[in-house]
Image (cartoon, rainbow, N blue to C red):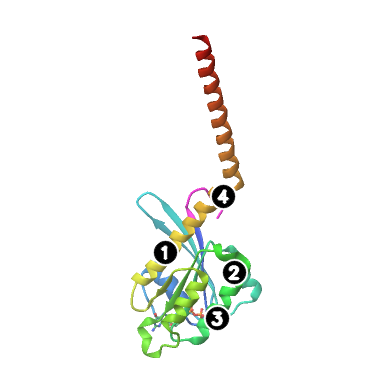
Amino acid sequence: MSQRRFTSAKIVILGGSGVGKTAFAVRYITKRYIGDYAPNTEMLYTHRLVGTRDEITLEILDTAFVMSQETLEKHIKWADGLILMYSVTSRVSYQDACKVKEILFHLRGAEMPVVLVSNKHDLLTARAVTEDECDNLAGEMDCPRFQISVAEGQDGVNEAMDELLVLIKRQLVKSLTTSPEHVAGLEKKSRLYNMKKAFKKRIVRSRSDTF
Ligand SMILES: Nc1nc2c(ncn2[C@@H]2O[C@H](COP(=O)(O)OP(=O)(O)OP(=O)(O)O)[C@@H](O)[C@H]2O)c(=O)[nH]1
């Protein structure tokens, strides 16, 4: 995200097999839930968010579950932010999310904007992952977590994406304010300020010398 204003963001949706990655992306973009999606396919969507003042172009990559380690790492490096998803009905998918967390830390450290999404909460009778486990994983990644049902509603999907966009924007501001150009600019400004101050002092002193 090499930009000075928040005008675009690259988002990757990662998670185990059948957790609802495609359903999530399609629901967010079209506000619809179809229920039947082509399994294990990778798809890049472009979506424009038009606000009252700004327009943000989102590139949303819905990943396939089966991919090489190399591809996974490429996706993580490409992303400005990640939706890490598992299904509350699948223990394996929770373990997959834990594995992705390790790779994520290794490649991008703790700075990467991430939200953890636990999906399929309409199927709680078949629950295989506890709420504590969800909290633990989110705590380890120091990221917000959402327990949603893509099938049942739009709100959880929107809230997770909105939160991710807030984190991405925060990261952009942080990287701009700590960039070498910004720091050099601040130093230049403060040098100028000190010079001005010294100059003013000298004028005042020379005036008081006269009278
Ligand atoms: N009950 C329920 N089913 C869901 C929910 N979200 C997705 N599904 C279903 O789960 C199945 C898999 O959904 P997908 O969106 O294809 O999952 P995916 O993670 O993209 O799958 P792969 O890319 O093949 O790994 C589909 O039959 C969806 O209809 C949900 O919130 N509740």
The reply to whether dot 2 and dot 4 touch (C-beta < 8 Å) is no
- Is residue 2 on the magenta stretch? yes
Q: Quadrant of ligand 1?
A: bottom left
User: In the image, is the residue at mark 3 within 8 Å of ligand 1 by its beta carbon?
Assistant: no
Between disc 3 and disc 2, the foreground one is 2
The reply to whether dot 4 and dot 1 touch (C-beta < 8 Å) is no
Question: Label 3, label 2: how many angstroms apart (C-alpha)?
Answer: 15 Å
Name the quadrant containing residue 152. Answer: bottom left
* Residue at x 50% of width, y 82% of height: 94
Q: Residues within 10 Å of mark 1 (few under 14, many from 20)?
A: some
Residue at the extreme right of the image, as rendered: 70
Q: For mark 3, what is the residue?
A: 96
- Tell which of 174 and 12 is nearer to you: 174
Marks 3 and 2, the one that precedes in the sequence: 3
Q: Secondary structure at mark 1?
A: helix
Q: Secondary structure at mark 3?
A: helix
Q: For mark 4, what is the residue?
A: 178
Marks 4 and 1, the one that precedes in the sequence: 1
* Residue at x 43% of width, y 78% of height: 118
95 to 26, vertically: above or below:
below
- Is residue 98 on the magenta stretch? no
Magenta span of residues: 1-8
Q: For mark 1, what is the residue?
A: 163
